[in-house]
Amino acid sequence: MSMPVVAVVGRPNVGKSTLFNKLIGRRMSIVDDTPGVTRDRIYSECEWCSRPFLLVDTGGIEPESNDIILSQMRRQAELAIQSAQVIILVTDLRDGVTATDQDVAAMLIKSGKPVVLCVNKCDSVGAPPIGIYEFYNLGLGEPIAVSAAHGHGTGDLLDAVFEHMPEDAEAEYAEESIKVAIVGKPNVGKSSLINKIAGEERVIVSDIAGTTRDAVDTVVTRGEDQFVLIDTAGIRRKSKVLDTIERYSVLRAHMAVDRADVCVIIIDATVGFTEQDSKIAGYAHEQGKGCIIAINKWDAVEKDTHTMNEFTKKLQTDFSFMSYAPFVFISAKTGQRLDNLFTLIKKVKEQNSMRISTGMLNDLLSYATARVQPPSDKGKRLKIYYMTQPSTNPPTFVAFVNKAELFHFSYQRYLENQIRETFGLEGTPIRFVVRERGDS
C-alpha cells in the first residue's frame, strides 16, 4: 500500500519550507514559487513512531489573489490537500491571525480533512506565548506552538498528526507482490496497456495528453505471481508543464517510481526515442530500480525482417547509460508479447534483489584482477583487498582498496561487466562503494 500523505500548507512566508526541512531532518532545495523557478521535488519520506509517511510541502496560499503565479500555487496546495490524509496548517505567531489565515482555515474545514494547527516562530522555551490563544479563533482546535528554526514542539506536532492518521489499512495485495510502475511520456499507451492486461477499463484512455492525473494501482495475477501495476501520468519536459495539475502529476509519477520494484519505461514505436525518454529512464536508474524498456505500438510500424534488429541497435545507443535494461516490443492494442513482458518483470525483480556471497565475489575478483591488472599511477598500483555485498535493490558492492583514487571509473566498469557476465543481474543497475582500508 502507498504511504499516508501529510500536506504542509499555509499562506506565504510563515515558515512552511523551514518546518518541512526540520521534519525530514535535512535541507532540501525547496524555494517559493516565483516566475522562472520550478520546484523539482516537494515531498520526502519521513518516519515517526516507526511508521513511515510522505510529507508534502506546498507553495503559499493566497485565496483571493488573481495573480497567475499565486493562483497556480493555490491550485497546487488544493491538489496536495485532496491527496493528503492529514493537513498541517502553518501560521505565524508574530503576525497573529490574518484574514488570509482565516480564509485558508475555512477552505480546510470545507475539505473535511483532519487539520493540525501549527503556530510557528514560537522561539522561546517554556510556557506557550500569550499570543497563541488568538489562534483558537480559526476553529481548528488546539494550536501547537512550534519553532521550525530550532525544532521546539515538532514532536508534539507529529504526535498530533498521528492522532488523526488512519489505521494501517489491510493491503489489497500480498506484501510479496511485485510492484511495477508504468512510466513514460504522455500518450505512449500506458493506460491502454494496463486496460489490456486487466481485461477491463480500469483507467481512462484518451488521446489527450495528460488524461491520467494520478497514480492508479491495478492488481493482476499471472500464474502464481501477483503484480501491482501503477499507472502514472506522463512525465513531460519541464517547459511543457504549464499548469499545476500536470506538475503535481509529475510529482505523483516520481512517487510511483519510488515505491515500485520494477519500472517499465514505455517508448512509442511510431515516434522513437526522445530526450524526455532518457530523463524518465534516468530518474528510475538513479533510484536504483529494475528497468525494462517496452516499445509500444509495434503493430503500427511497417517492418521487414531487419526492422526489430535495427530498432534495437539504435535504442542500445540511445540508452547506453543503462545498457543493462532489456528491450521488449509490445502492442497494448493487440496484446502482442505481453506474456514476455511479465516474464521479464519477474526476472528483473529477482535480479534487482539478488545477493551474491562474499566468497563467490572474491573468487570472481581474483580471476578478474589476474586477467586485467588493476591500474597504477606513479609507481603505486591499486590493490583491491576484497569485495562484499551489503545490500540489494539495487545490488551494492563495497570494494576495500589501498588507495581509492586509483580505482578509476574504467576499472569499476570492467569489474561491473565481469560481475554481470558471471551472475547475470539483467535489468538492474549496480552500485559500487569504494573504501580505503581503515575507513569506517
Image (cartoon, rainbow, N blue to C red):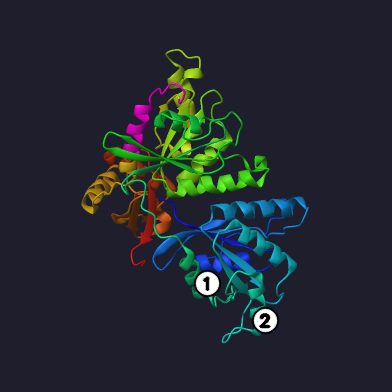
Question: Does residue 305 lie above or below 193 as drawn?
Answer: above
Q: Nearer the viewer, residue 164 or 57?
A: 164
Q: Nearer the viewer, residue 360 or 18?
A: 18
Q: Which residue is mark 2?
A: 131
Q: Residue at x 34, y 42 (%)?
A: 349
Q: Is residue 261 left or right of residue 190?
A: left
Whole-angstrom CA distance, mark 1 to mark 2, is 18 Å
Q: Quadrant of residue 234?
A: top right
Q: Residue at x 67, y 78 (%)?
A: 134
In magenta, the rendered stretch is: 332-348
Question: Does residue 173 lie above or below 186 as drawn?
Answer: below
Image x and y of residue 409, in percent: 43, 48
- Mark 1 is on which residue type? Leu
Q: Nearer the viewer, residue 254 or 398?
A: 254
* Marker disc for residue 157: 1
Image x and y of residue 298, in percent: 47, 21
